[in-house]
Amino acid sequence: MTRGRIRARLRRSHLHPFSCLRPNANNEEPHPLSGPGFSRIVHCNRPDRHLKKPLKYCSNYISTTKYNIATFLPKALYEQFYRVANFYFLVAAGLSLTAVAPFSPLSMIAPLAFVVGISMLKEALEDWRRFAQDMKVNSRKASVHKGDGVFGYKPWQKIQVGDVVKVEKDQFFPADLLLLSASYDDGVSYVETMNLDGETNLKVKRSLEVTLPLEDDEAFKNFTGTIKCEDPNPSLYTFIGNFEYEQQVYPLDPSQILLRDSKLRNTAYVYGVVIFTGFDSKVMQNSTKSPSKRSKIEKKMDKIIYILLSLLLLISSISSIGFAVKIKLQMPDWWYMQPLNPDSLYDPDQPSKSGLAHLVTALILYGYLIPISLYVSIEIVKVFQARFINQDIQMYDEESGNTAQARTSNLNEELGQVDTILSDKTGTLTCNQMDFLKCSIAGTAYGIRSSEVEVAAEKQMAMDLEEQDTQITNGSRCRKSAHNSWEDSRGGPEIELESVITSKCENDQKPAIKGFSFEDNKLMDGNWLKEPNTEVILLFFRILAICQTAVPELNEETGMFTYEAESPDEAAFLVAAREFGFEFCKRTQSSVFIREKYTHPGQLIEREFKILNLLEFTSKRKRMSVIVQDEDGQILLLCKGADSIIFDRLSKNGRVYETTTAKHLNDYGEVGLRTLALAYKKLDESEYSAWNDEFVKAKTSISADREAMLELVADMMEKDLILIGATAVEDKLQKGVPQCIDKLAQAGLKIWVLTGDKMETAINIGFSCSLLRQGMKQICITVMNSDAVAQESKQAVKENISMQITNASQMVKLEKDPHAAFALIIDGKTLSYALEDDMKHQFLALAVVCASVICCRVSPKQKALVTRLVKEGTGKTTLAIGDGANDVGMIQEADIGVGISGVEGMQAVMASDFSISQFRFLERLLVVHGHWCYKRIAQMICYFFYKNIAFGLTLFYFEAFTAFSGQSVYNDWYMLLFNVILTSLPVISLGVFEQDVSSEVCLQFPALYQQGPKNLFFDWYRILGWMGNGLYTSLVIFILNIMIFYNQAFRAEGQTADMAAMGATMFSCIITAVNCQIALTMSHFTWIQHLFVWGSVTTWYLFLLLFGMLPPYYSEDAHKILVEALGPAPIYWCTILLVTVACNLPYLAHISFQRCFNPMDHHIIQEIKYYKKDVEDQHMWRRERSKARQETKIGFTARVDAKIRQLKGKLQRRSSTLILPNCMPSPCQ
Amino acid sequence: MSGHMASSSNGGSGSGDSGAPRRNSKRPKYSKFTQQELPACKPILTPKWVVSAFLIIAIVFIPIGIACLLGSREVVEVVERYENECIPPAYANNKVQYIQSSVDKTCNISMTIPKRMKKPIYVYYQLDNFYQNHRRYVKSRSDKQLKSLKNENDTSSCKPEHLATNGSTIVPCGLIAWSLFNDTYSFSRRQNNQSLTVNKKGIAWKSDKQKRFGKDVRPKNFQGGGLRGGGDLDATIPLSEQEDLMVWMRTAALPTFRKLYGKIEVDLEANEVINVTLGNHYNTYSFNGKKKLVLSTTSWIGGRNDFLGIAYLTVGMICLALAIGFTVVYFVKPSYHSWSEALICGAWPRDLVIQPFYHGTEALDRTKNAFWISFDGIHLAGTSHLICNFNAC
């Protein structure tokens, strides 16, 4: 981004009297730095001094990796075995080396090693990616002083404390620097701290006066100095230190410190000395671990694992007791076991001891109940799912070039269970792009174009011409009335089709100029000269053009000026002024130059306005003023600010337009516009100079309350103003927001908006994105007004709020109309009371029955608190979405945090679990990916437990036939392969590829999403069902095999089945049965599923064949078992067929039955799709879709429904009066 | 120290130098795989499929069941329990002492052939309550030792039956071999006292003979471990010829098991009586195990096993019943479900759907029951159509 020429050197300090308070170095004492915490000494320009201790500080190399080569193994292993299941298997593997183990050590250790190895490989890969990212940062180049006034490029990681660094425009600071000088003469520079705190406005930094001469490379030839300062700490906004330079000591404060990861803006270059490097830098000190979140399904899965562990313990105890009893009572009779030669494990004389040892054996033996590969399979599946999310082309934003990102993959399935969405407004629902839309000058409203809110509201309200007259913009929308009878009382035609409900089509009236959508011929093209109050209008435009802190930049291609402003509103004003013919073209040290087009017809006049003072905008002051002297020598104070602030400061004769302007401001607020009031006052020379003396005195005073004094002085000046008008700027809705909200509402999600904006704006945004609609009963909960609050005691306020909540709850409860919808609107101050412990449940109870909730004026902290309240109070899954640093708390608090990777920096994204670049992608993320992931993971886990129970229990049953001795009927190798090879891939393919319905159908039937929040696929009923299925399968497999292979010959050659034959047959049955089961579970077969499912079965036989070919040394009793014994025996194949069918028959019958009598939503859709009804029978398809829309109460669909209900009600009334004049209207609704 | 701050500088760099080419490179490449649009078959259980699936299972299973049953019925099996009969009355209360004593244990029993038995007739012994599958027992063998002479001393797994009293190794070692079954049977026809040869060859698995039991391994110090277990082995015959041992060493899965003793390769006629002279040596008396002698023919499914056929028939019948059941249900219930049917009772008169556009109120008056209105005019950005349901009760 080349911005062309280097700007003229400017002194910028007068623009920022508040933030650039320059300590008067001569008078201010250096900080008395002593004691712990202030030990850092930096020798400027002498990095060589920092090579050895104690001045050796950490290098600028940063590493965000979790492991390094040495710590990888122990740390990663620890993490793996921290999981209870893995730990169990580790112990089991350890014990398998002893005599108690029922299996060979290999068959225990190999699967564990495999599973843990894969997990660790994944960890290693992820860490490697982090390392690569770090390396990219570490090898970024920065210009560093190499001695003799020569600067050269060095990678960041080589930068040392004490180095002098030159940073150019739009570069990042490589470390925390002390600002020495900047391209502006007075050492002022602008810094964007988006990466630190998410704020987009520029921060002003300025150097010490003494270092100002260091303004070119040469000057650093002999530069030395010493900085003594605080030790590294995470506080971004404080810094204490002293700078010793030329035998003088100067105090340092945060305004001289440039922090790593912030960016130089609007300044050509700066020089700085490195103070903190690498991990010492504030940003690194600040990095916090985002809380690790686990999905509800995983938490539940842990519970199931514990259940299985208890089951394991139970059957192991049964086993070991049985064993002890058998050994005590019967073993002495079993001469063939030489009971007189016992070893410790089989000692009839010490049955309890043997029993105890056997408990360990049994615990290992039945370990197959615990699916060892569950965790690793889930991890693999989630990696794929996350990849699908990242790769989804439909969530790719062309404009910003960002894809959706699953930043953590362990919450994929949680996306399918969201119940409440908590959304930020600015930057999330709106795009934080300001368009100058309307203005009110001298009591006349200009600007005919409607805001999006208006457009939406008009369309929503488009009843007929008659009703359009009674416009929406009157009266407060916030009614606490019990019932809004407004709709019923109107006459007129019955049905007015709402022709267009959504906001503007994309193509229609896109503003040609960014930031300017104003349209009114009365003001454009110099027509304002014909308006009555030309003087006032002129002044209005001048305020727009002069009262600002921006820097103009000539775009060489278009010849137009663009403006680098601190806030988007200001840029919009400047653009507007330019369009009105007051082009701000130049800023010098003390002046602003405006090219005025129309004031002298036909001439382009460049006027100079001397800026005498600038009282900048702060969030506390909520206004900004400039004191200018025009070419005639007239001194003017021009002021713009929040309407309430300005209105308080009007002089008596300045209130001519107050009432009309206030009305316009109100109207603008109604339609969702951001407003500012503009005022001025004329000053005479003496008045000004008297004030200026005061101001200078305050500015140069040394006392600590200098800032307060300055404010006071500024306050003195900014009064007795004359109001001239107001501006209205539109905060545009993001693309597709209303549609997305509508879909999400249809999906049954509740949407809460938490915004820092004022109530009116929030409500209007609520209307424009269909969270609110007419006919919805709005419940506003506020404390009356600020004055009252001050007087009343806190208790009284709380009681009042409690009353309001109770009344509202009562009203909701008494509401008879099933279609009535309520909206709750609450402001931050009230919320602070409502969130207190004694009231929050009451508040929550009310909030959850409301269709939409809007919280305005909330602080970031409150956002997090509300999120926590919803999360903990309802116990349901919450999703927080936001884009700014103020949303971080909420994002981290919610079950799922979604960051919008928009304009407001990366903070929210960094804290989030998923990032998307547009709000509208949330629909696809939840309704498609969330829905799929939820079902996939849920089905996958259920199946996992099923298959392991089916397999593990057969081992147990067999024990009963072996006197509980711990002998397994299967070869060790079979068991080794069971979890790892033979059954893992099908279930992974289920987890990765399963789709109940296609993505288009998901989007067309958002109601399908409800299966997730209702948790239909992972409730205990279903889990136990699957476990029961596992139990049944194990019983069928075991009993049928035992009965079939009881003691008869199993083939025509007369041989009877030994343990090997029986084991192999049973195992074959298990493999076929569980793989057929998964095939029945799947509803979506790509070639991959086919390959894995049928491939697994084939693999088993292939394995049996090949394993049997091995010399008996390896294959033992499985030698040639398939070729010689089982293969030729028809009974073997008959058994497999019988058992497989018998195992799956109940499931098949169950799902057939369910589909027939109690179909789930997706069954119906699948069926429609299958019969291609959607193509043949459009009616049916649409009807289903409308039916699928559940009881939606927000979104424009609900709006249409509400309208139709209302019309129908009227019709019924009419018809009943026509037909049965004496009858009451049908009491239908 | 996790990385979100540091990676923020990466993110920052992205926004810092995001040129046009860089943007495009982030665009995901379209592939059917990544977009999850791979062609797939989506079988769903439509009524047709359900009924035919059950029907097919029934059609397949019932004949198999009948075949199995027929195969099983073809088998003639004679079972004779003898462990009590072979105890002389004097030892009736002291069977263990009898079996451990050195008195002559020859015993004669007779078996009646109920049906004609075609050769080969397999002779089995059946033991009961004998835990050949006990872990201590199963583990107590050395496959290496059995396989080849050079592993003769590989007996660590054979404990406690690995060393003879003189300290040298036992071949074959271990409890399994040690407890070798040693009852003997010889058969003759009562009619003509003609003895029936029992062929003891070919009763073991071929692979056992060829691969698992070595040709160069001969019994050594067998039963020399102080305690005497079961039978003896001829030390001159290599293990690869000792088929009885091989059969015995194939441990049974269940505590009741049959093992092949030999084959009688002549046909036996119905009602023929067979005299069996047996050497009742094997001690099952300590643990109250039964001993049975079994003569059985085989068919294609092996021995007599009605269960398999019955199981097949049962499953087949259940499927048939299900198929019929579902057919009936689908006839009664319409084969096509819909959301409205699932959620709301009552059928919707389809002919009252007013399409495509609806104005005014006349139709509303006309159709008071239920109707649809399609608002084609409503453009819902994406959702082009919207149907609203007027349910006027």
Image: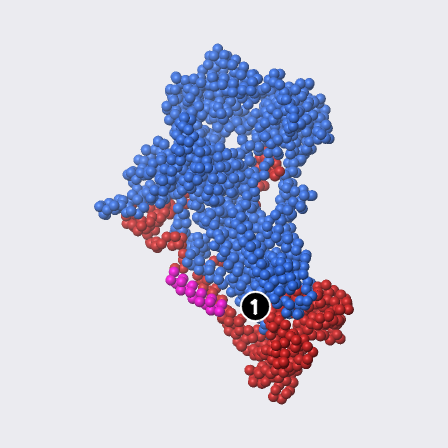
Chain colours: A blue, B red
- Residue holding disc 1: A1042
The number of numbered badges drawn on the structure is: 1
- Residue A751: x and y in percent read 44, 41
Q: Quadrant of residue A127?
A: top right
Seen at 54% across and 54% down, the residue is A307
Is residue A969 among the parts visible in the rendering? no
- Residue A995: x and y in percent read 50, 52
- Is residue A1118 depicted above or below A1229 in this figure? below
**Three-letter amino acid code at disc 1?**
Ile
Chain for mark 1? A
Q: A570 or B241: which is nearer to us?
A: B241
- Left or right of A1090: which side holds B348? left
Q: A1058 or B227: which is nearer to us?
A: B227
Q: A422 or A5: which is nearer to us?
A: A422
Q: Report the span colored magenta.
A: B314-333
Residue A935 sits inside the magenta stretch: no
- Left or right of A451: which side holds A224? right
- Is residue A1060 depicted above or below A494 in this figure? below
